[in-house]
Each structure stands twice: as structure tokens, then as C-alpha cells.
Amino acid sequence: MGKKVIIIGAGGVGNVVAKKCAMNPAYFSEVVLASRTLKKCEAIAEECKKIGLPTSVQTRQVDADDVPALVQLFNQEKPFMVINVALPYQDLTIMDACLATGVHYLDTANYEPKDVAKFEYSWQWAYQERFKKAGLMALLGCGFDPGVTGVYTAYANKHYFDEMHYLDIIDCNAGDHGKAFATNFNPEINIREITQKGKYWENGEWIEIDAMSIHKPISYPNIGPKESYLLYHEELESLVKNFPTIKRARFWMTFGQAYLTHLEVLQNVGMTSIHPIKFNGLDIVPLEFLKAVLPEPGTLGENYSGQTSIGCQIKGTKDNSEVTYYVYNNCHHADCYKEVQAQGVSYTTGVPAMIGASLMCEGVWFNPGVYNVEEFNPDPFMELLNIHGLPWHEEVNGELPHTY
């Protein structure tokens, strides 16, 4: 029996989540899409209707910064759960509204405060007792990275290792959207993420590095070598906590030279700053202004060529023998556009959010409290990835020369 869900956020990822939920009435009997901009919700609902999806999408307007407005919406709609694909700044207000109304919660990115370019799970993990006491579940970081990468790691740990020692998450977008400069997800969040200092886990401590200062070519399946940069990414924090045998954990992401050149110029002229400046008597945040003039990520899907490749490379031991393991997904932008009118980065985030929500609705993944995806049985999630558009591939005891 399907459950009613509210999706908050009508950007590129919200579009994918709404359509994938509307395709699966067995899990989701009713779908409500809410955003500050009602027009965006209505456009997605209209597309769902046009392509003949079995569940119609209802639309609502809500400001996700406003807890009383969220509470009112949840009390009116009485959903089983909320799928939060709004901005990471809004995670806590949505969690507060869930606690006030008895609604379960899922998101794809951890909370970060608006005035500091910093992300960590501490703010959301602090909700553990309140959710547990209320009999509610919050599932954090259920996109691709974080999300699928955590499930991949849990799957590897369950089936291939006694101890995992080295983890490298490698993320490549080898697609071409034809724009001079654009980000594949929210520009504000994307630029904040890559311009802060990098960080990785080694021998029980975090090693901090200057942004983008460590890089090397990594070879990706069906793509070949691409220059990859070591960044800090939030799933590293939960994975080293939940798998304490890991000695080193790193996250790598590819960037083209044109992207990096544009970014350097924007940084040099102050356009990536998150601190307000006075302009014509108004307080303007340069990065927010930049976001307004860059292409909306949800509009990049049409004619987007190429593919993404995201996976986990792990080294450890089983029965006292060394094991290497690589699990990954390659996703074609054109296939995503054909199915849900989205580019691959939105698709790879939106599909896992729908899968995590379906497992919560079915009671397969369910436990009151606040959890990361790797804390649940990975097998049903891995099975659903193959069914819903993100098939995975694995290599056992192959060579991993580019990261080790």
C-alpha cells in the first residue's frame, strides 16, 4: 500500500524525485510537490501529466525557512514523510516541522549554515533523541554522493571485507552542456563546496589542505583518464564513524580546465564571496547574485551529451588476504533527459532519494532516530538501483593503480 509524500524543492533534483515517485504508485499513493516558487511546481506537475505518469502530482507553495508555514502544510496534507530536496540551509527548519507534526524525514545533503561555508552532520545528528522519542525516522544524505556511495561502502563491507582500510570515492562528470560556465547542481552550494579547504581522513585524524591543491588523473570506466581533485565531502564524516577500521578516506571529483579558469576569475573579483556588500543601499551577497545570473541546473538537460561515473574504490582484508573492490555506476545524460527531462547529475541524486523513501514507506528501512544510509541493510537498496535506472558494476581484486 503506497504512502503520501511531500517533496520540498522544485529544482533539477525535485523534478526527478517528483517524476520517479509519480511513476511508482506501489510506494507512493499521493505526491505533493512544494516550493517557494509555485510556478516551478506547476510546470513539473504539468510535465508528469503530459508524459502520462500513473500518480498525479499536487502542488503547494511554501517557504522552507518558515517553520510555522511548514507545520501548517504538513498538518493540512498529513503525509507519511517529507523528501527534502530544498537547500541545505533549510534542513533544520524542515526537521523541526517534522517533529512538530509527526512526519518522517529524508534529505540528500547535510545542513550547512548560510553565513559559513561549512558542512558537517553534527547539527542533524543532534536530533537523534528527539526523533527517536517521537517514533520518527530521519534518513540523511540519500542522494548519490552522499547516499549511494554510503550504500556501496556498506555493501562492500557486508559481502567482501572483514576490514576495510582504504576508501576512495571518485566522481566524474564527463558530460558537455554547451555552456561557457554552469554548475550541475545549485550554483551557490556547488561553489561553496569546492572553494572551501579540502580535507581527508588518515590514521584517525582529518588532514586539511588548500582548496583544489591535490589532484591527479584518474581513469574512469568507458571515459578514460580525467584530472580529479581531492575535496572534502560530507559522507566521509559518517563513513569513518560507522566503519572505524577505515585508515584513510578520500573524495575525488573531476573539473574541466575551462570551469576552473572561470571559477578562479570569479574568486579573484570577489563574486564567490558569501559576505554581503552594499550596492545601491542594499545588502547583496555576491554568490547569491552570481547564482541568479548563471544557468539554472534544471535547464541543462536538453542536448547534454556524455556521461557521469561515480563509484567507490576500497582496499582491505578478508580471511587475512588483501582484497580490492570497485563498485560504480555510469549514467548517460541523454538517457536521463529522455526519461525525466533532466541531466545526469540531477538524476543520480533524485533516483536514490526516491529509492530511500520507498524503503521507508515499505518499512524495509525503518528505525526511529536519525541515521545515515550506510547504517541500514544495503542489499534491498542495491537491488532497487538496478530496477530504477542506476545499474551498478563491480570489480573484485582488480588493480586500482590510480588511487593506491
Image (spheres, grey):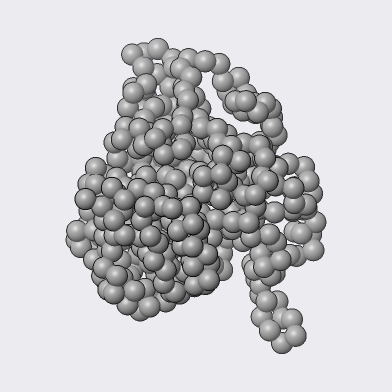
Q: Position of residue 19 (x, y in %)?
A: 44, 53
Q: Position of residue 250 (x, y in %)?
A: 54, 36
Q: Tell whether 293 sits left or right of 145.
A: right
The answer to whether residue 397 is above or below residue 390 is: above
Task: Give the residue displayed 56% in from the left and 68% down from the top.
Answer: 115
Q: Nearer the viewer, residue 312 or 82?
A: 82
> In the rendered image, which quarter is residue 131 located in?
bottom left
**Res 99 seen here:** no
> In the rendered image, which quarter is residue 332 located in?
top right
Q: Nearer the viewer, residue 340 or 343?
A: 340
Residue at the outermost bottom position: 281
Q: Nearer the viewer, residue 316 or 105?
A: 105
Q: Position of residue 93 (x, y in %)?
A: 39, 69
The answer to whether residue 116 is above or below residue 218 is: below
The answer to whether residue 269 is above or below residue 194 is: below
**Res 404 seen here:** yes
Task: Give the residue displayed 78% in from the left and 52% down from the top.
Answer: 180
Task: Give the residue displayed 24% in from the left and 66% down from the top.
Answer: 102
Task: Give the residue displayed 65% in from the left and 28% down from the top.
Answer: 223
Q: Tell whether 368 sits left or right of 176.
A: left
